Amino acid sequence: MKSFEFVLYGVEKETYWKAESKDNVDEFARDVLLCFASNVNPQTMQISIGCTQTSSKKLKGRILAFIEKYESIDPRIHRIRKFVSSLQEGEHFYFLPYTSTLSRKEKYKLTMGLMAQNSGRDPEKDIQAMEAGLGDFLKTYLIDGKSSRKKTAIGEPSKKKRMCRFCKNTRAESEGILTGKQTKTTFRQEAHAISEALGNKTIILHEECDACNHYFSKTCEKHILTYLKFYVTFFKVKNKDNIIPKIKGKNFELTYIGKGKDALSSDSAGQDNIDGLGEEINIGNTATNTEAAKSITGVDFALMYTLTDEERAEAVSPPEQIPLKFYEKLSFQEIYKALVKFSLSVIETKNLEGFERTIEWLAGKRAESTLPKIAVLESYQHFTRGAELTVYRRVNGDSTLPLAVGEFQFTFLKFVFIIPTFIDTQDKFLDDHEYERFWSFFMFKMAAGWKYQDFSDATEKEFVLSMRLPSKPVQAPEEHINE
């Protein structure tokens, strides 16, 4: 059987293609190459092709003609059109024939080269600088991770063959014994590797049974959703019902009143110190008429806040700060667990070796009182509404570096955390010296503004979001996370 394969690679998108046929695929391959050819000799029919391509109307026209010829044979061909159509005029990308896979290191180089070309810089110099600065890192760590922009399923596709990576198909039976009901392991529900409430609708984990899916939704995932709920609503992240949720607390309600579907009420908790939310928040000490609020130009949210008797008695002007009290309690260690659970959900089954004790900790079978610090960065440079998760896995035996590190991006927040193994021969990264060695080895150190927070506390506590109101409008919210 003959085949022809190629890769289209851009800074933020990539498409892999492999054509196979019992007959030859020479005509298909020729037509693909003609689409991306820079020159064709009519006498010898020799085709000149450069790997670096530039988006243009002429190129898109050739792609459309190619699509029309082959779409009746294989509708998947529209993936090529979608890739090219998404590029801006003049944007660079790579056409790589005769290959269908790229290593992480190759992707780093390609991305660096494209970014340099799109900015008018010399790509070779940028790549050399990258390799000089990250050479040891790229030799030590492989990079896993999934973007919420692309539909991805992880693990065993056949339900009959599936083994839950968190309980080995034992949780349902164990719960059945406790309740006196015979229960079998099932995989009926679609388990999202990262909570759907955080905007992930595309990354699915096959190897999470229904019992574990329910367990995590009531434990660690509930806590991280509580912790990030304010950002979900404020940055208009749609939940699994495809709507922007309302937040209802003990003394307030925050409702999105902009265009789109009505918000869904949900009681939740959270604690952050949100500084300067600007004009988009409408503050009032009485019930707000939603229809009237909608008529105010530029208002996206209505915040209804109930003053206490003490606040009402002392009020002579709008308060500078208001405490938003939530219904649910919050555990910081459960937030850490959620980040780790997400991380172990996006890597392939074969790469889970070494995390056996980690999974016991996630499943509630192992208690830990102290965990490594989590680094938190507030920056709009890599803003994303959908959650993005990258996992760095160590490939050598250097136990003075973490076996795996997670990088979780949600809205303007970035969390970098060590995935603990609790193995005696592995450094724990609890003291400053061990943590500094890890941090100095990774490229995260190049960004300024990191805060290092302790998420070890497993107790559930009341949480209050302290909102400071600005004296004048600001361009963008500035959030500060306090324990």
Image (cartoon, grey):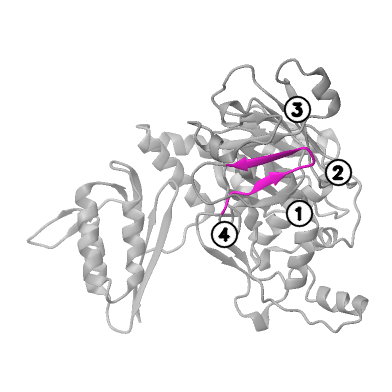
Residue 330: where, in percent of width, then height? 82, 46
Closer to the N terminus: mark 3 or mark 4? 4
Residue 456 — which label? 2
The crowd level at tag 4 (other Cα within 10 Å; few <14, some 14-19, many 20+) is: many
Q: Secondary structure at mark 2?
A: loop
Instruction: Please name the residue that numbered disc 1 is placed on.
Output: 222
Closer to the N terminus: mark 4 or mark 2? 4
Looking at the image, which is closer to me, 162 or 218?
218
The amino acid sitting under disc 3 is Ile
Depicted 2 relative to depicted 256: above or below: below
Mark 1–mark 4 distance (CA, rounded to whole Å) = 17 Å
Residue 201 — which label? 4
Depicted 68 relative to depicted 114: above or below: below
Mark 1–mark 2 distance (CA, rounded to whole Å) = 17 Å
Closer to the N terminus: mark 3 or mark 2? 3
Location of the N terminus (image quadrant): bottom left
Looking at the image, which is closer to me, 414 or 52?
414
For residue 43, side relative to residue 400 (left or right): left
Residue 303: where, in percent of width, then height? 66, 35
Tell me the magenta residue range: 243-256
Residue 5: where, in percent of width, then height? 36, 67
Instruction: Please name the residue that numbered disc 3 is placed on.
Output: 322
CB under 8 Å between discs 1 and 2? no
Residue positioned 78% across, 29% down in the render:
307
Closer to the N terminus: mark 1 or mark 2? 1
The amino acid sitting under disc 1 is Lys
The amino acid sitting under disc 4 is Lys
Mark 3–mark 1 distance (CA, rounded to whole Å) = 25 Å
Residue positioned 87% across, 79% down in the render:
176
Residue 447 — which label? none
Residue positioned 70% across, 40% down in the render:
253
